[in-house]
Image: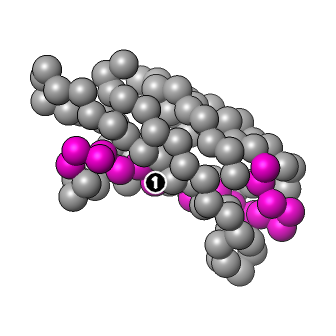
Amino acid sequence: MQVAFRWCSGSPEFAIGSIPAGTKSLDLRMVDHQAPAYRHGGGTVPHDGKNSAKIPCGALGGTYVGPSPPPPQIHDYEWTVTAHDASGKALAVGHATRKFPE
């Protein structure tokens, strides 16, 4: 899958492409490469079955904790998006990485 995102004041905005047929949900998780033990969480969103999706800013509530590297550090944050079918089976995985702050 192709994944792109941009930072927002809430959770990021995502553009996801090449989503496989049969996908019912997308699970999104973020990792800080400089502090991988820190849990940033993420979220799961339902999927309508199309081969692409746009997820708006702020759509990931719940466990998502935004990037917060100590000044003046710049960290690399990687999002992993996993497509799941109705039974929860993983169908595909995509990744995207950006620095924060940019």
Image quadrant holding the C terminus, namely top left
Q: Nearer the viewer, residue 16 or 44?
A: 16
Reply above or below: 3 against 49.
Answer: above
**Residue 95 image offset from top left, x and y in percent:** 54, 49
Say what amino acid the circle numbered 1 marks.
Answer: Arg
Q: Residue 78 is drawn in which quadrant? A: top left
Please name the residue shown 75% across and 44% down the image.
17
Residue 17 forms part of the magenta stretch: no
Q: Residue furthest left?
A: 71
Reply above or below: 16 against 39.
Answer: above
**Residue 63 image offset from top left, x and y in percent:** 38, 52
User: What's drawn in magenta, residue-wise?
Assistant: 18-35
Give the structural element (helix, strand or loop) at label 1.
strand
The residue to which callout 1 is attached is 29
Residue 30 forms part of the magenta stretch: yes
User: In this rendering, would 7 be left or right of 33?
Assistant: right
- The colour scheme used to paint the residues is one colour
Tell me if I can see residue 49 in this picture: yes
Please name the residue shown 75% across and 63% down the image.
24
Q: Nearer the viewer, residue 47 or 37?
A: 37
**Residue 53 image offset from top left, x and y in percent:** 75, 42
